Image (cartoon, rainbow, N blue to C red):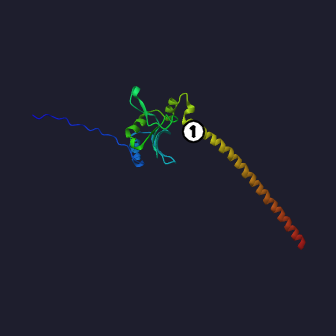
Amino acid sequence: MAKRVAKKEMKKEEKGVRNLTQIRKMFNKILTSHKGLTLVENRHGAVQVKRNGSLLFSARKDGMIITHPIYEGKGKKKERIFKVGGNRWDHLSLVPFDQVTLTMLEARVKDPKTPADYHDEIYKNRKQESGLVSKLEASKKRKEKAGKSATKARKATKAKAKGAAKARKATKKTTKKAIRKVATAVA
């Protein structure tokens, strides 16, 4: 009798994506299988998936931004991977396109936490170290500066308009006087 040989089962490995059309296909699978998600393309060309207005992940030119930290391993060997440069964006993960997988995105969709929750959890007592907070403060300063310069510009245009109106009025008066003088001299 022949001995039975067990067949090897091949594990299907997920391959990463290479371009935005493959990303869009992946997003379509996620959008059709989960309710409450919206697909948005921002003005910079990034394709984003949002839930209730908060960003879950965004495909940009330099890779995929996923709005939660990704770890590899368990326990003491747990290590952060796909970290954004520096420690100012610890609540985000920047994954190269060739390493993005559908299970990675599914895990983010199933995670109920918002990006704000992750931000608050990671930057508890050190909010000033956060890139998000520093960006917000810089934006406020720019807005204040732009508001002041806009006010100055408005005042300058009003003054210029008043000056032009006075000049028109003055030329009208002088031309009327000149016409009267000519009319009296002829008569």
Residue 9 sits in quarter: top left
Residue 36 sits in quarter: top left
Q: Quadrant of the N terminus?
A: top left
- Seen at 42% across and 31% down, the residue is 79
- Seen at 50% across and 32% down, the residue is 117
Looking at the image, the residue that sits furthest to the left is 1
Number of numbered discs overlaid on the protein picture: 1
Q: Secondary structure at mark 1?
A: helix
Residue 171 sits in quarter: bottom right
Looking at the image, the residue that sits furthest to the bottom is 186
In terms of depth relative to the viewer, which is nearer, 183 or 102? 102
- Seen at 58% across and 36% down, the residue is 134
- Above or below residue 126? Residue 155 is below
* x then y, percent, for residue 172: 81, 62
For label 1, the crowd category at 10 Å Cα-Cα, with few meaning under 14, some 14 to 19 and many 20 or more, is: few
* x then y, percent, for residue 82: 44, 37
- Seen at 83% across and 62% down, the residue is 173
In terms of depth relative to the viewer, which is nearer, 105 or 74? 74
* x then y, percent, for residue 90: 49, 34
* x then y, percent, for residue 121: 50, 29
Q: Quadrant of the C terminus?
A: bottom right
Residue under label 1, please give it: 135
Left or right of 107 on screen, residue 173:
right
Which amino acid does the dot numbered 1 rest on? Lys
- Above or below residue 163? Residue 142 is above
- Above or below residue 68? Residue 16 is below
